[in-house]
């Protein structure tokens, strides 16, 4: 993506309520930190690599504080319901929290409805994406949209789960234009 397109995308997302470089999260236009982690989909563990996912298209990387809490459960349900739209737009989704893999296996079945994976956000990943919730070890509710070239094209951070699906889907669709 050219610098001009990144600037236009940043302006469009800022006007739509997306967070920009002035906040604590990583700024639009920055290269997303690469990582691999343990993840779960449909109750089964596998190795997730951001670079491998990006080779297939844009990635919505959303961080949430804790599996099976009310807001995180509702957010997972909303992403699960929207997965056909994300897939139609050529994007994949992964949720990330610092929960252990056994919890995430269960969460992937029960709340993500086998529609998308959830991964273990190790402390280095939480720090790398600047989503630490104080010193709790938990992640803030922050969603990143990452273009296939590895650049962050949208960031949305809000403790309220509502809006994350809508805003990330709009950002993914804007990439296709």
Image (cartoon, rainbow, N blue to C red):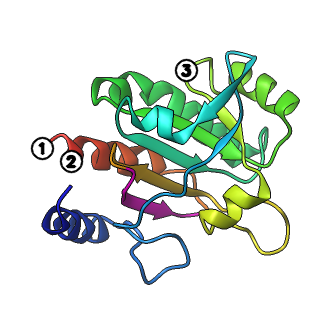
Estimate the spatial distance between the alpha carbons at disc 2 and disc 3, rounded to whole Å: 23 Å
Q: Looking at the picture, how far across and down is residue 125, in whole percent?
A: 68, 56
Q: Looking at the picture, how far across and down is residue 111, in whole percent?
A: 68, 27
| Whether label 2 touches label 1, CB < 8 Å | yes
Q: Earlier in the sequence, mark 2 or mark 3?
A: 3
Q: Is residue 165 left or right of residue 107?
A: left
For discs 1 and 3, the disc positioned in front in the rendered view: 1
Q: Residue at position x 74%, y 69% from top?
A: 133
- Does the segment drawn in magenta span residue 167? no
Estimate the spatial distance between the alpha carbons at disc 2 and disc 1, rounded to whole Å: 5 Å
- Magenta stretch, main secondary structure, is strand
| Disc 1 packing (10 Å; few <14; some 14–19; many ≥20) | few
Q: Is residue 28 left or right of residue 80?
A: left
Q: Which residue in the protein does label 3 denote? A: 115
Q: Looking at the picture, how far across and down is residue 77, in whole percent?
A: 59, 31
Q: Which residue in the protein does label 2 denote? A: 174
Q: Residue at position x 85%, y 67% from top?
A: 136
Q: Which residue in the protein does label 1 denote? A: 177
Q: Which residues are magenta?
A: 150-158
Please tell me in which quadrant of the rendered image residue 128 appears.
bottom right
């Amino acid at each position: 993506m050219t610098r001009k397109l990144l600037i236009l995308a940043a302006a469009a997302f800022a006007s739509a309520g997306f967070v920009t470089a002035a906040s604590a999260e990583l700024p639009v236009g920055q290269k997303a930190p690469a990582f691999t982690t343990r993840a779960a989909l449909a109750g089964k563990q596998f190795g997730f690599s951001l670079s491998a996912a990006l080779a297939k298209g844009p990635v919505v990387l959303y961080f949430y504080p804790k599996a099976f809490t009310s807001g995180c459960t509702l957010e997972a349900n909303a992403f699960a319901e929207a997965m056909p739209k994300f897939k139609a737009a050529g994007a994949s989704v992964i949720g990330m929290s610092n929960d252990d893999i056994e919890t995430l296996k269960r969460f992937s079945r029960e709340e993500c409805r086998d529609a998308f994976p959830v991964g273990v956000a190790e402390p280095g990943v939480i720090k790398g994406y600047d989503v630490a919730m104080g010193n709790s070890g938990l992640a803030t509710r922050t969603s990143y949209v990452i273009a296939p070239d590895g650049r962050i094209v949208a960031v949305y951070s809000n403790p309220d789960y509502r809006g994350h699906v809508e805003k990330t889907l709009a950002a993914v669709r804007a990439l296709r234009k």
